[in-house]
């Protein structure tokens, strides 16, 4: 992660530094151009003004009064530290009279560049140049402007020479300020680069640490990053992955627990009947029982125990499937009344043995739920078989179905053994038997299976039991309003 930090930091810093330097150079160049340009404009206006006044004096033949102007011009040049030359054009006809000049050009040895701008002025073009001047021993700005007569002919020129020292000082001072500003800007750029680099890299480090923690098996770990950008989306994905891993781990543990429970239940519950069967079989094999009637009794007991074991294994397999989250129900729109009636018909033979009567009553013929027909029928069979088992002879088993507030409520009532109130919440536990149910046959898993069936249908089941009203199992299913159902 340090490499990423330094890469981001260096890249960001270089960009900011280059940008700052370019801005500084651009403004320095712009300022230099403006300062020098303003000075050129100033000297140019002065040269043009002198040329115009000289041309006017020539036109009006102001020889005497022009001397005063030249003196004033000399004083002005001295005060401004500027040299102002008025020279004649030797190639003009007529040329500027010496009375209007203050410098004899033929007596001056001037640099080539000065002679060039003077020649340009003779051609009617105003030009200038700046460079170190050996005569003045400083950097000077020289500018030459033409003097024209009434006919427009160039009869002379005005040469203005001014020092660039002040302008150079201003430029140097400005460059110093720009250098300070650039240094401060670079420092701020580095600080900003560090801040943004850390802000960018820190979430990546957290995401990396979270990934390592998840890889170590601690699936509930979260990144703790809340951002509205791509890194925030990545962190959110990592947190979602954490949740999915937690769910997967819980699912795996659930499957593993179901597997352990299944084998534990099988081994626990089969141990006793297998021991009984083995005892009877050993007794018969060893020849301790000689009487045919006794032998038949032992065989029947072995047969009964095998039947009990078969029912137990069947219930355990069903329970195991119902506890498996991957077990899929064949969901469809069902009329609970039809399923209850089907289950009631299936146990008529058992009811007849105890002379029991059974009824299925309802408040609304259209009591619809979304469910698996086989599993709902199995639920009713479990409750009705229990009712037959624990009902007193010549009593009744009543099923009542009603619609109430978008819920289908089914009541299965029998009249026989009463379940003590303190045991109501325990009867849906594995292998639990009510204390007053004696030695009735059963695996102790029927109500557990029933409870799982109801829960897989998003419903709930409870029991109420007393001597007057009998034992009543109450089941609540969410109602469905699928209009495609028809009886």
Image (tube, rainbow, N blue to C red):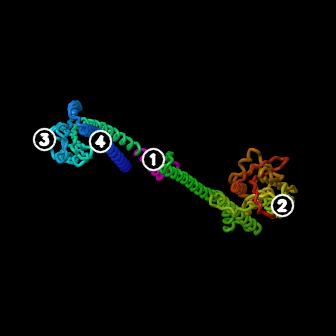
Residue receiving disc 1 = 203
Residue receiving disc 3 = 108
Residue receiving disc 4 = 37
Looking at the image, residue 54 sits to the left or right of residue 342; the answer is left
Q: State the residue in front, 202 or 320.
A: 202
Return the x and y of residue 68 as percentages of the image width and height.
Answer: 22, 30
Q: Residue at x 76, y 63 (%)?
A: 484
The reply to whether the C-beta atoms of the residues labelled 4 and 2 are less than 8 Å apart is no
Front tag of 4 and 2: 4
Toward which corner of the image does residue 147 lie, by quadrant?
A: top left
Main structural element of the magenta stretch: helix, strand or loop? helix
Front tag of 4 and 3: 3
Instruction: Give the Cα distance between marks 4 and 1.
Output: 54 Å
Return the x and y of residue 215 as percentages of the image width and height.
Answer: 47, 53
Q: Residue at x 17, y 48 (%)?
A: 91
Q: Considering the image in quadrants, where does the C terminus appear?
A: bottom right
Residue receiving disc 2 = 351
Q: State the residue in front, 24 or 477.
A: 24
Element carrying mark 2: helix
Q: Which residues are magenta?
A: 197-222
């Amino acid at each position: 992660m340090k490499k990423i930090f330094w890469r981001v930091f260096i890249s960001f810093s270089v960009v900011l530094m280059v940008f700052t330097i370019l801005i500084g150079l651009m403004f320095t160049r712009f300022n230099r151009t403006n300062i020098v340009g303003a000075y050129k404009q100033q000297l140019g206006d002065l040269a043009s003004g002198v040329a115009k006044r000289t041309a006017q004096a020539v036109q009006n033949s102001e020889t005497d009064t022009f001397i005063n102007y030249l003196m004033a011009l000399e004083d002005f040049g001295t005060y401004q530290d500027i040299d102002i030359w008025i020279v004649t054009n030797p190639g003009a006809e007529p040329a500027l009279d010496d009375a209007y000049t203050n410098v004899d050009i033929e007596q001056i040895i001037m640099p080539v560049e000065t002679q060039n701008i003077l020649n340009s002025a003779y051609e009617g073009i105003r030009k200038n140049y700046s460079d170190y001047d050996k005569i003045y021993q400083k950097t000077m700005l020289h500018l030459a402007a033409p003097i024209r007569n009434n006919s427009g002919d160039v009869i002379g020129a005005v040469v203005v020479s001014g020092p660039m020292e002040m302008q150079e000082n201003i430029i140097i001072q400005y460059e110093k300020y720009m250098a300070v500003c650039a240094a401060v800007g670079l420092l701020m750029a580095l600080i900003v680069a560090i801040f943004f680099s850390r802000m960018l890299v820190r979430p990546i480090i957290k995401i990396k640490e979270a990934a390592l923690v998840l890889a170590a098996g601690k699936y509930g770990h979260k990144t703790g990053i809340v951002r509205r950008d791509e890194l925030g989306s990545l962190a959110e994905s990592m947190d979602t992955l954490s949740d999915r891993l937690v769910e997967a781990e819980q699912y795996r543990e659930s499957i593993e627990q179901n597997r352990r429970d299944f084998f534990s239940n099988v081994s626990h519950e089969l141990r006793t009947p297998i021991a009984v069967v083995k005892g009877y079989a050993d007794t018969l094999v060893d020849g301790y029982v000689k009487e045919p009637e006794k032998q038949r009794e032992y065989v029947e007991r072995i047969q009964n125990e095998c039947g009990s074991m078969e029912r137990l294994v069947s219930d355990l397999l069903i329970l195991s499937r119902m506890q498996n989250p991957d077990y899929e129900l064949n969901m469809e729109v069902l009329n609970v009344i039809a399923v209850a009636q089907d289950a009631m018909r299936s146990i008529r033979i058992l009811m007849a043995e105890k002379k029991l009567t059974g009824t299925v009553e309802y408040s609304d013929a259209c009591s619809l739920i979304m469910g698996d027909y086989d599993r709902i029928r199995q639920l009713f069979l479990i409750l009705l078989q229990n009712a037959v088992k624990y009902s007193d002879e010549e009593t009744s088993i009543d099923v009542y179905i009603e619609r109430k507030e978008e819920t289908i409520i089914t009541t299965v009532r029998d009249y026989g053994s009463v379940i003590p109130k303190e045991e109501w919440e325990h009867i849906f536990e594995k292998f639990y038997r009510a204390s007053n149910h004696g030695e009735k046959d059963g695996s102790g898993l029927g109500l557990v299976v029933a409870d799982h069936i109801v829960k897989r249908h998003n419903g709930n089941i409870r029991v109420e039991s007393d001597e007057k009203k009998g034992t009543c199992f109450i089941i609540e299913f969410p109602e469905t309003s699928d209009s495609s159902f028809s009886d």
